Image (spheres, helix red, strand yellow):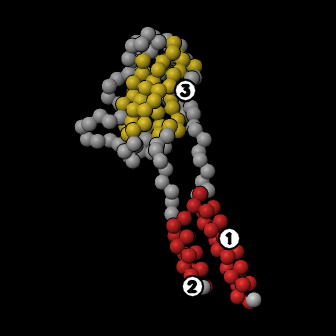
Amino acid sequence: MRRLLVSLCLVGLTFFSTPQATAHVEIIATFPEQSASVNPIPTEVWIEFSGDLQNLNGEIVNTIEVTDSTGLVVSYDNAVIEAGRITTKVSGQSAAGVFVVKYRVVGQDGHVIEGDYTFNATPDFAEAVPMTTSVLEKSSSFPIGAGVFFLLLASLAVAFLMYRKSEKK
């Protein structure tokens, strides 16, 4: 019985202590921030994701498009991908008002993530300086597997004690 209990504990420890894979990449920061009002109109827009983006030689799989308040696309076609960040330059001829940022990216796991967000911008003579403007809340670092393992271990301990008690009768 002792060998069985030790074996079960080792199997549970091995299984539940392995790192859990995250499902998809998520946005962790943007410039400009979603729904923000910025002054001046930015010269570049970027989105940073929680994991690396796929970068296939010669194929465009990650896109970012910025349109100004008149509906004119003001971003350039050649977005730059660096690890988990996609960046595009914005035309200096952009009209002030509500800008829409549309993105479609492919994470290293092959999943496609697409969406959009808006920000407001007004003109000024100064250049916008890109900086991290938003960071989404990180998930807990406590692995769920550890909690399940300790619950399993406690159940095994109770079962073992009940078994020992029934042997004595």
Q: Residue at x 59, y 80 (%)?
A: 5
65 over 84 or under it: above or below: above
116 over 52 or under it: above or below: above
**Mark 1: amino acid:** Ala
The mark found on residue 34 in the picture is 3
> Mark 1 or mark 3, which has the lower sequence index?
3
Question: How far apart in space, not on screen, are marks 1 and 2 (Cα)?
Answer: 17 Å
Q: Residues within 10 Å of mark 3 (few under 14, many from 20)?
A: some
- Can residue 51 be seen? yes
Nearest-to-viewer mark from 1 and 3: 1
Q: Position of residue 126 (x, y in %)?
A: 51, 17
Quarter in which the C terminus is drawn: bottom right
Name the residue that disc number 1 marks. Answer: 154
Q: Residue at x 29, y 34 (%)?
A: 60
Q: Residues within 10 Å of mark 2 (few under 14, many from 20)?
A: few
Q: Position of residue 165 (x, y in %)?
A: 74, 84
> Mark 2 or mark 3, which has the lower sequence index?
2
Helix, strand or loop status at disc 3: loop
